[in-house]
Amino acid sequence: MKRAPRLRQLLAAVLTLLLGSCAGSEAVTVSDAWSRPVPPVSPASAVFLQIANGTDTAVTLTGASSEFCGAMELHETTMDDAGVMAMRPLAGGLRLDAGESGLLAPGGIHLMCLEPKAFEGSFDVELIINGADTISATVSIEDR
Amino acid sequence: MTTRRLVRIAIAVLAVGVAAWVLVGPRLRPHVFHGVVMQSGTPAPAIDLEATSGGRAGLDSFGGKLVVVYFGYTHCPDVCPTTLSSLNKALDLMGNGADDVQVVMVTVDPERDTVEYLADYMTYFDESFIGLTGPIEDISRIATAYGVYFAADEGDIASGYTVAHNASLMVIGRDGHLRLILPPELTADQIADDLRYLR
């Protein structure tokens, strides 16, 4: 009779370990994807998001695609000491080590959406990881 | 005079003091600018460009309003929409005071930003916003006079090229002098706070 609680505790511990290891092996996840509304005549907009590498190996966000953008590119905005802002493709993509998170935010890294076709509501994008794998995300168009 | 009466008087005096501090105090304290204050002895460099509001426009075209001058371009996906959106929010925060402010964007990409195109772009952010364009030589001369650098960057980019540019906002006072430079990282609240004081 005294062994049952122990067995239950053991089972609970094993289950916790199993669930824990499952959570640890989650793939790359994307959250809070958003884009500022731009005029319908606008040739370009920017997508911002948070990306977390829940795997145990390094991954690299190399680009994205969407049927709502003529083209998408990973860009970085930089500002020098004189306040001059420049925008250039992020060479090599955004590398995230195991367990690391990255933030795409105004004034920093963004996914440029060239010739945007969605101007309100939301639209779907496919993020490209390591130049091959894709992750789907829904981008909310909102003025923050 | 009883002690009770003295306490009442003291409380009344304290209440009046606190009310005065709350109501009048902020007006007595000097305004602390979020932007960089300029004390120019000469008028701001002249601007004479084609305007989305029709015809040509310069600093004296806006009826003595504060003029916020931004150098940007429409193919800019990040900084320019962010700045124009912040300016729109700042004007909203100012309420009726926004009537005393005119926002203009001088394009640093006149090759792609035609006046018709700029009109659609600018009025999306705010009906009152005006875009200015003209020959690249004129825009370069004006930008240089304001200490604003810009240069096309022919990188390997889907949009063809980008334009690196100084993204600060120049605020021209009612007297036509450059009064303030607002860095691009300021929030709408901070912009409104400074413009409210200057107008």
Image (spheres, coloured by chain):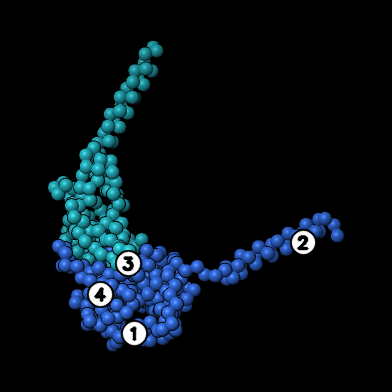
Chain colours: A cyan, B blue
- The answer to whether B65 is drawn above or below residue A67 in the figure is below
Number of disc labels = 4
In the foreground, B140 or B90: B140
Mark 4 or 1, which is nearer the eye?
Answer: 1
Q: Earlier in the sequence, mark 1 or mark 2?
A: 2
Q: Which residue is mark 3?
A: A82
Q: Quadrant of residue B103?
A: bottom left
Provide residue B3's location: percent of width, then percent of height: 82, 55
Q: Is residue B67 visible?
A: yes
Say which of B118 and A66 sits in front.
B118
Residue under label 1: B46
Q: Label 4 is found on which chain of the structure?
A: B
What's the distance in space between the residues labelled 2 and 4, CA to CA?
Answer: 66 Å
Closer to the chain start, of discs 4 and 1, is 1
Mark 2 vs mark 4: which is more N-terminal? 2
The Cα–Cα distance between marks 1 and 2, rounded to whole angstroms, is 61 Å
Numbered badge on residue A116:
none
Mark 4 Cα-neighbour bin, 10 Å: few <14, some 14–19, many ≥20: many
Please state the horizontal and vertical placement of residue A128, each as a whole percent of the image.
Answer: 18, 50
